[in-house]
Image (cartoon, rainbow, N blue to C red):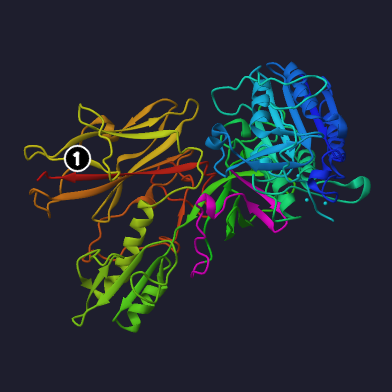
Amino acid sequence: MGTAFVLLVGINDYSALSPAAGPTLGSLNGCVNDIRAARGWLEGRLDSPPPRILELADGEATVAAVTDALRTHLGQAGPGDTALFWYAGHGTEFPATERAHLYVEPTGYCQALVCADGILIDKDLGALLDGVASGGAHTVAVLDSCFSGGATRLSGDLVKRSLPHDPSWPAYGDPGPRADGPQARDVPVPAEGARHVLLAACRVNQASYEDGHGAGRHGLFTRALLGALRDMGPGATYRQVLAAAGSRVQSATEHQNPVLYPADPGGIADRAVLGGAADRPLSPHLLLHGPDGWQVDCGSTHGLSSGPEGTKDDSGTEFGVVEADREGDVVRVRAVEPLRALVTPVGWTPDPVRIYPVAVSALALPPTSVVVEGGDRALFDAIDAAPPLRLADGDLKGNGPGHGQVFKVVVRDDGRARVLRRDGTEATAPLPAHRVPDCLVHLTRWHQLRDLANPASPLASLVDVDVSVWNGERILPDGHGEIRCAYADGREPLVSVRIHNRSHDRTLWCVLLDLTDSYASHSGLFPGHFIGPGRTGYALGNAPVQLSLPESRKAEPGAFVRDWLKLIVAEGEFSTVPFRLAPWSADAPPAARGADEGHVLRFTRPPHAGRDAGPGPGGGGAPGQWHALTIPLRTVVPE
């Protein structure tokens, strides 16, 4: 790498501002320690060429001095160089009143760093940093202060680093009288998004804390961040380091959550710290050791289901390590929390210092709640024995889980049963009561495939599916989100289905399923192929796809049939066997099922040649990343 230009700002002494904040809240004790510790790490890490460090402590760190140093010192960094701004001190927030600020502040508040004599507003700081980045430098900001997730630190054993805002404080852009004269707003603001990466001590609405005693007092975030940087060494990415630091902060307090911005997979967050190429594969999810044991930074707010917790089968969602030297190693989810999943390694012992990139390799699918009216003990026992089913009390709105399907079974006096959906309509024709468990398992599996999704997949924006009139224009979804294809002059519609890989550097494995309203699923349209970067895959080898009503439905005005095209995209090949279902029929013999079929869906590469081979014991290879996309399609006979 080139030269690292570093600006370190640490402020303990806020005596000039403390009358506004109150005498007990003004000054801090660990901020200067923070920047001295950061300097020691930098000088140990960067020796050729040595970093060019400017340090502003306490009264030196005025608004004018900090803004000037951002421009002139960090502004020297050019292409190939790194510009690092590290701030430890108070943060503050105040109501946003300017229209331009309200556009980008949904909380209604602006955040700011509190310098020795006034505030540096987050919008101005961001513009200054992007101005540095516009010169071609890799630009980084580390902010250990309160409200820093919005670009801007409590004291006891834990001391809050925040001050209530005082309107009399001068701010950048309106500095008030100073010896160096007024400061103009001449920072270039780039049209695109932020060009710098931010590692912030906490969310925009949280406090940042410091702890320790005497000379050993530091900000929780700075201590955790420097510890993670030392343990992980060169080549670790911002995402990995922030995840490790966040886990360490959480061991001290649950009220401070460090933030990485921007966090888009494949972007600046996945570059090595201080620039350069990362030596670890891209993954939005990371396995690390925290105060509660092993955890993955993916939880219910990211879309991860709690899966089988409380059901009859203990196996469930798994994450597979995607590093080449750990291929085949997995961890199993034991609890899902809002921001993380607590996991247990399966058959291996991870290194507690390492951060492992992982991907979802097995997904625990939500169970179906079943309300039964009538029937005998044998029926109840058969339903209770099926892993994807859960007996529930009550009506169709049910007392079951908040996710998954809900069906009601009504057994008639003649021994036949009706299976009803949540809205009271019949899911199938009446069937013999002894076939109800098989029917419910089949319907559960079909709905799980149709609703399959992967939380926070980095592949989500890389692949598109187009449905077009054969030799004609693309068909756009209607107001209900469906693609509508109509008969014309009594003839079935013909369409073309294309799968576009919009990535410029990834070859992706794609499977296109057709799920029909007869509860079938097949992969005949596109059974599984790799599609190269910028390339297109064609259903049926670019032959026309004929859409028609089944023979059981007369093609009369108003008749229709529904399909759901389900595209599954992955970095590696996987078995398509679990994605296939024949149409449901009460006359067909019961299907043989594995122990966890209908409960866990595994994304593992077939261990043998041929995509139809099922995964062997223990999986079958590293899963890589995967994404699922659903396209509802309706074939109609016009009125």
Q: Quadrant of residue 512?
A: top left
> Of residues 308 and 31, which is closer to you in this image?
31
Q: Is residue 381 above or below residue 323?
A: below
> Of residues 570 and 492, which is closer to you in this image?
492
Region of the chain picked out in magenta, as a range: 285-313
Q: Residues within 10 Å of mark 1 (few under 14, many from 20)?
A: many
Considering the image in quadrants, where does the N terminus appear?
Answer: top right
Residue 26's spot in the image, x, y percent? Answer: 83, 45
Residue 269's spot in the image, x, y percent? Answer: 62, 34
Q: In this view, does 527 lie above or below 553?
A: above
Q: Can residue 1 be seen in this view?
A: no
Residue at horizontal 46 percent and vertical 44 percent from the top: 608
Q: Can residue 117 be seen in this view?
A: yes
Residue at horizontal 32 percent and vertical 61 percent from the top: 443
Q: Is residue 402 above or below residue 546?
A: below
Q: In the shown orientation, is residue 471 left or right of residue 355?
A: left
Q: Name the residue under label 1.
A: 485
Residue 413's spot in the image, x, y percent? Answer: 20, 83
